[in-house]
């Protein structure tokens, strides 16, 4: 099956369906390598990893073992929070681990920087995410990185970044799915030419989403599963998605997508409005009202009365 592509703001072609390579915890070894090899044989051409995932080496082995020309594969990796003050060295280390010549897309994984002990810097402490971005901008033209972007950035923090940026991020990778559609962020990123990549695109398999009557109804019309309906919803909106699966059958399923009409898109848009349905998948990350050491206000995420983040 041919995977649709999106065009980034620097003209690069970006496969709209990719393989998330986080294995649930850092590492993965041969399981990661085998997953990547299988995915590439099936037709995937977009792989998403990160320094934090501790599997860049195995992703790179999978790419090299596949026999597919390097230029046909789009590889994303990410800057770890402890590396904000050493961007160029961190890129060189990722390149050495991947061993695939260059990185197609290099993302700032989170706006937070951390010291070597894991203590989070506050937004006004150096290196700020603006300073980190300015270091990332210097990578363009070196041949090491083709495109740069961010991850887990809210509209608030994108506005702070863009006020100082020379290069507009090509991508913002965030959690998006019908339970947490982030419409304001979608609109803002689109207005700035920033492509969104959705992680956790199926809300980590939450049953009330996967079995939602709206998705089943649309799926019955199009002969697609609820997850394939969700993939069609992303493509309708011009959003890339990176579902993760190490299972052959699900990899095949995740490459397929329903053709969504505007009316069906609106029905899916409304799913999160039902009582109890608007929520993220990562509530367990929050500790004492903070995520990775920053408050929701600092992150630019507003809370509802029920403790969930607003769209």
Image (cartoon, rainbow, N blue to C red):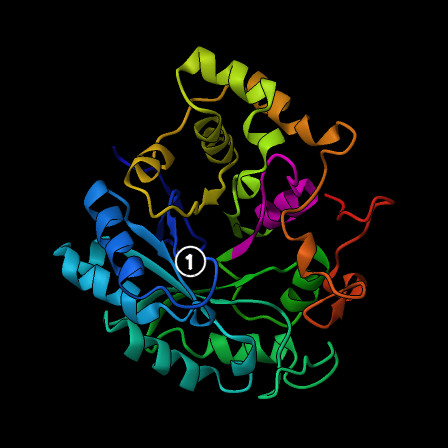
The vertical placement of 183 against 233, above or below, is below
Q: Is residue 283 left or right of residue 116?
A: right
Q: Is residue 158 above or below residue 191?
A: below
Q: Is residue 179 magenta?
A: yes
Left or right of residue 117: residue 283: right
Q: Residue furthest right?
A: 305
Which of 172/175 is in front?
175
Percent x, y of residue 248: 28, 40
In front here: 169 or 219? Answer: 219
Query: Where's the N terminus, which quadrant?
Result: top left
Q: Residue at x 63, y 69 (%)?
A: 111
In percent of the image, x 34 and y 48: which residue is there?
246
146 or 218: nearer the viewer: 218
Q: Secondary structure at mark 1?
A: loop
Q: Mark 1 — residue?
A: 23
Residue occupying the point 64% across, 43% down: 187
**x 36%, y 64%: residue:** 28
Label 1: how many Cα within 10 Å (few below 14, some 14–19, many 20+): some
Position of the C terminus, as image quadrant, is top right
Where residue 267 appears, as percent x and y from the top left, is 63, 21
- The span shown in magenta is 172-191
């Amino acid at each position: 099956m041919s995977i649709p592509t999106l065009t980034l703001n620097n003209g690069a072609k970006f496969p709209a369906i990719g393989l998330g390579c986080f294995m649930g915890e850092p590492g993965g070894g041969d399981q990661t390598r085998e997953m990547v090899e299988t995915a590439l044989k099936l037709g995937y051409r977009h792989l998403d990893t990160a320094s934090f995932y501790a599997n860049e080496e195995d992703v790179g082995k999978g790419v090299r073992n596949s026999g597919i020309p390097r230029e046909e594969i789009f590889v994303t990796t990410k800057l770890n929070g402890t590396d904000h003050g050493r961007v160029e060295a961190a890129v060189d280390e990722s390149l050495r681990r991947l061993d695939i010549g260059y990185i197609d897309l290099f993302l700032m994984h989170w706006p937070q920087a951390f010291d070597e002990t894991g203590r989070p810097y506050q937004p006004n402490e150096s290196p700020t995410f603006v300073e980190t971005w300015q270091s990332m901008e210097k990578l363009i033209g070196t041949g090491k990185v083709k495109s740069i972007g961010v991850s887990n950035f809210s509209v608030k923090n994108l506005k702070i970044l863009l006020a100082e940026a020379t290069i507009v991020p090509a991508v913002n990778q965030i959690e998006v799915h019908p339970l947490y559609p982030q419409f304001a962020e979608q609109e803002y990123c689109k207005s700035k030419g920033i492509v969104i990549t959705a992680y956790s695109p199926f809300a980590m398999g939450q049953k009330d989403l996967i079995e939602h009557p709206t998705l089943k109804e649309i799926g019955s019309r199009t002969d697609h599963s609820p997850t394939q309906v969700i993939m069609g919803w992303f493509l309708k909106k011009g959003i890339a998605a990176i579902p993760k699966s190490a299972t052959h059958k699900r990899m095949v399923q995740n490459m397929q997508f329903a053709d969504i009409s505007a009316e069906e898109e609106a029905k899916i848009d409304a799913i999160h409005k039902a009582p109890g349905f608007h929520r993220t998948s990562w509530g367990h990350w929050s500790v004492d009202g903070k995520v990775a050491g920053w408050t929701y206000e600092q992150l630019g995420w507003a809370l509802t009365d029920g403790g969930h983040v607003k769209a």
